[in-house]
């Protein structure tokens, strides 16, 4: 992942290939500092270090779960912005049952 | 419950046949409930509203996690006692239960902001900031976050309770207290009047001492036409039991050998197909649930995180959510339907029910899962939601129930997972297992008391 990559999300954007590659501690720290400054969050150094460690760990975990196997299909199927409502509709499809319109 | 029936279906029969006076029953249950906080520290507020009479469940006691709104009372959400609020209206689920006669006796304790898998010290009626106590054995941990909801049901003082489940918050305490806990399909139950933690993962859940009682409460709080009717002949159910390999040190799925033996015996006895090794799609779904949860905890509690007033668990999860790449969350949400489809096709196309363990070990002692304790064991704490959180990401229904006692007399539970909106299939099969193990009276509050083998 490039530390300089934008953290902004546009509804139509799709995950780039680098999204799920493992973060190195150095660029993860840059990423954390940037996100904290965007959120105007001031936290102490040990907490930053812990966040970096957890982020690196989570990133490796993501990498190991072999997202690449399904990523392309998912991106094709979900070009539009996703919402909880569309997920609940997919639950209804999997059960072979339509939901009433007063669903949450 | 002092001469009262143990299950709702028995209570209903007694009311119908005029064998019970609902007002006297209500008063007796209220007295028992009010005494419960002195011993178990699980009640945030008592209510005094008389139940409707001439209804099918008039006077049957229930209670709820203090995360549901009541008329003019906003919930304390594990941070404080409830507060007067002119704007608060009764949560839809509670309103529906009250309409058929249920007596809501009070608000029950939970972990702060419904955000921990282990009971925490929180304010209750008679004790300030004490951890609620497991009625089966005070040494055993009470899971979270719907801790009080499980304690009240397991103690026998109410027939059922409502909780909420984001990563296992109904199923984990149900397991530690040896009762039933249902997490329904995402979107099945309206969340109006329920405080959110993670809007796309939260569901209202039900805790009881009998599978039939889960069914009774579920039918009331949801629209019947949303639930898929089950097959009634349980012998024709196709069931697979997942028993991750024991003694495989490198596997995150490692089960304690004794628990694995119990599960093997159980599945063999009932003629289930046994699956060992990895459960396809589960590891991904667990990772993605964590990404969604971190992000939504961060968004929900951004103010308290910024002002440094958030409790430690909210801060831990929420900070990570605020700094993790936005694309992770976007992907996790976009991929949800895909993983659901894959999981259902792999595990539930040729099965009616998939059964997983609920926990890899025996119920932990309080000290083993309390951060800061000398006996703290991180792997036992982390394992509490090991088999539950992926189900929230997939949105599927899941029901936890006890099936045996382990060598130390602690309940061993299973988790039944079904297709979306097939809750009644899970309940019907769970009722079949319940009858085989516990008979016709549900789980009696004395069944798992310490020392009984």
Image (cartoon, grey):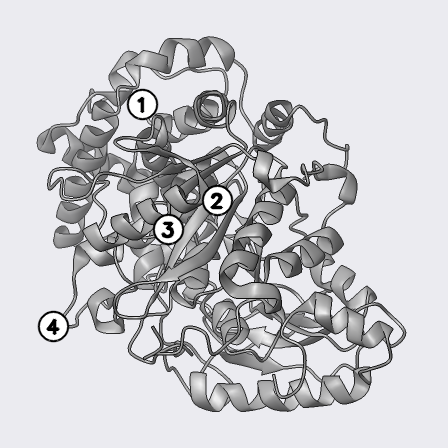
**Quadrant housing residue B67:** bottom right
- Left or right side of B449 for B146: right
Disc 4 from disc 2: Cα separation: 35 Å
Q: Position of residue B442 (x, y in %)?
A: 58, 66
- Residue B202 tag number: none
From the image, which quarter does the C terminus of chain B lie in? bottom left
Q: Which residue is mark 4?
A: B374
Q: Secondary structure at mark 4?
A: loop
Which chain is indicated by disc 2?
B
Instruction: Say if mark 1 contacts mark 4, CB within 8 Å.
Output: no
Disc 2 from disc 3: Cα separation: 9 Å
From the image, which quarter does the N terminus of chain B lie in? bottom right
Disc 3 from disc 1: Cα separation: 40 Å
Disc 1 from disc 4: Cα separation: 44 Å
Q: Residues within 10 Å of mark 4 (few under 14, many from 20)?
A: few
Residue at 64 percent of width and 50 percent of height: B191
For marks 4 and 2 on the same chain, the one whose residue lies earlier in the sequence: 4
Q: Which residue is mark 1?
A: A6
For marks 2 and 3 on the same chain, the one whose residue lies earlier in the sequence: 3
- Callout in the foreground (1, 4): 4
Q: Position of residue B276 (x, y in %)?
A: 28, 33
């Amino acid at each position: 992942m490039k530390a300089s990559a934008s953290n902004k999300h546009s509804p139509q954007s799709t995950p780039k290939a680098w999204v799920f590659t493992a973060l190195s501690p150095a660029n993860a720290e840059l990423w954390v500092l940037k996100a904290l400054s965007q959120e105007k969050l001031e936290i102490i150094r040990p907490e930053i270090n812990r966040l970096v460690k957890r982020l690196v760990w989570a990133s490796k975990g993501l990498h190991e779960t072999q997202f690449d196997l399904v990523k392309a299909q998912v991106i094709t199927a979900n070009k539009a912005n996703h919402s909880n409502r569309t997920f609940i509709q997919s639950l209804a499809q999997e059960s072979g049952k339509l939901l009433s319109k007063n669903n949450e | 419950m002092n001469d009262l029936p143990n299950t709702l279906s028995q209570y209903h029969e007694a009311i119908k046949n005029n064998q019970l006076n609902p007002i006297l029953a209500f008063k007796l249950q209220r007295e028992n409930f009010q005494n419960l906080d002195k011993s178990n520290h699980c009640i945030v507020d008592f209510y005094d509203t008389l139940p409707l009479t001439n209804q099918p469940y008039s006077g049957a006691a229930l209670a709820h996690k203090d995360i549901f709104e009541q008329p003019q009372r906003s919930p304390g959400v594990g941070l404080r006692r409830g507060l007067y609020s002119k704007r608060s209206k009764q949560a839809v689920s509670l309103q529906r239960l009250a309409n058929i006669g249920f007596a809501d006796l009070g608000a029950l304790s939970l972990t702060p902001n419904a955000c921990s898998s282990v009971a925490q010290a929180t304010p209750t009626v008679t004790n300030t900031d004490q951890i609620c106590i497991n009625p089966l054995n005070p040494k055993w941990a009470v899971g979270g976050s719907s801790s009080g909801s499980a304690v009240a049901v397991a103690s026998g003082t109410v027939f059922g309770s409502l909780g909420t489940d984001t990563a296992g918050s109904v199923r984990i305490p149900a397991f530690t207290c040896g009762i039933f806990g249902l997490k329904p399909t995402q979107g099945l139950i309206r969340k109006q009047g329920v405080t959110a933690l993670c809007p796309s993962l939260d569901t209202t859940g039900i805790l009881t001492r009998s599978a039939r009682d889960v069914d009774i409460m579920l039918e009331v709080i949801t629209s019947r036409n949303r639930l898929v009717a089950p097959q009634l002949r349980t012998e024709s159910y196709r069931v697979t039991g997942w028993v991750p390999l024991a003694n495989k040190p490198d596997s995150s799925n490692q089960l304690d050998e004794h628990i694995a033996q119990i599960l093997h015996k159980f599945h063999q006895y009932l003629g289930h197909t046994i699956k060992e090794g990895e459960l396809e799609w589960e590891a991904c779904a667990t990772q993605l649930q964590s990404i969604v949860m971190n992000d939504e905890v961060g968004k929900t509690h951004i103010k308290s995180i910024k002002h440094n007033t958030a409790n430690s668990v909210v801060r831990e999860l929420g900070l990570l959510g605020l700094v993790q790449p936005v694309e992770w969350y976007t992907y996790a949400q976009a991929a949800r339907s895909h993983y659901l489809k894959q999981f259902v096709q792999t595990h539930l196309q040729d099965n009616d029910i998939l059964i997983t363990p609920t926990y890899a070990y025996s119920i932990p002692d309080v000290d083993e899962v309390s951060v800061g304790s000398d006996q703290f064991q991180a792997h036992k704490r982390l394992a509490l939601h090991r088999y539950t959180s992926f189900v929230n990401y997939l949105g599927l229904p899941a029901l936890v129930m006890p099936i045996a006692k382990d060598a130390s007399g602690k309940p061993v539970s299973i988790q039944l997972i079904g297709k979306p909106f097939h809750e009644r299939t899970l309940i019907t099969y769970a009722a079949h297992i319940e009858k085989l193990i516990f008979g016709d009276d549900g789980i009696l509050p004395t069944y798992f008391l310490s020392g009984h083998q």
